[in-house]
Image: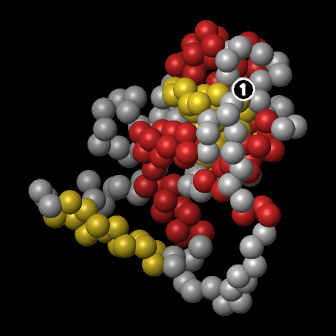
Amino acid sequence: TKERIFEPFFTTKEMGRGTGLGLATVYGIIKNHDGFINVYSEKGEGTTFTIYLPASEKEVVKERMISDEILKGAETILLVDDEDMIIEVGREMLKAVGYKVLIARSGQEAIAIYRKKQDKIDMVILDMVMPYISGGETYNRLKEINPRIKVLLSSGYSIDGQASEILDRGCNGFIQKPFNIKGLSRKIREILDS
């Protein structure tokens, strides 16, 4: 198992409880930053991941910018992701900045919830890679229900490729995982206030 944990789509979870992309995404992000990751695991004790990244040669700027502010809201957001960690962290971030949060763990569930509660949902945060129905297909179906739907696409992959195709079809924005509360709050306000 340890030898395969960074392979895309490898998972020890039951079918439908994760895509097996979490650690593959982490590995990809670390490699893109010229870093590496070590894994130490002991049965019955747990696992430790140690990440090594090269130090930046750029000068540290201590200037506070307006864009660093956490922007709050009170709207209702449907958060769609098949990874439990993203759901839990995302829900807490959104609640912390004032939003009401509905959760869907699959494209099918998102479509069903949106169909039932679209008049109460102001925006959807949609994972791009999910089992059964992809984020792109889910987006198309949501757009059929409401052509003016506001959607923020999220992915551990870069905006190139499939994400840019979905954006070209009218999706309102993109945020790369892992995201932080400042970046997420800013993207949400950009979309809701447009």
Q: Is residue 156 above or below residue 90?
A: below
Residue drawn 80% across the image and 64% down it: 66
Q: Is residue 161 left or right of residue 53?
A: right
Quarter of image, res 20: top left
* Identity, as a three-letter code, of the amino acid under mark 1: Asp
**Which quadrant would the C terminus be assigned to in this image?**
top right
Residue 6, horizontal then vertical, whole percent = 41, 57
Q: Nearer the viewer, residue 89 or 26?
A: 89
Q: Which residue is mark 1?
A: 122
Residue drawn 35% across the image and 55% down it: 5
Residue 135, horizontal then vertical, whole percent = 63, 32
Residue 2 seen anywhere in this rendered image of the structure: yes
**Which quadrant would the N terminus be assigned to in this image?**
bottom left
Q: Is residue 156 left or right of residue 166?
A: left
Residue drawn 81% across the image and 44% down it: 190
Residue drawn 38% across the image and 33% down it: 17
Q: In the structure shown, which secondary structural element does the residue marked by tag 1 occupy?
A: loop
Quarter of image, res 96: top right
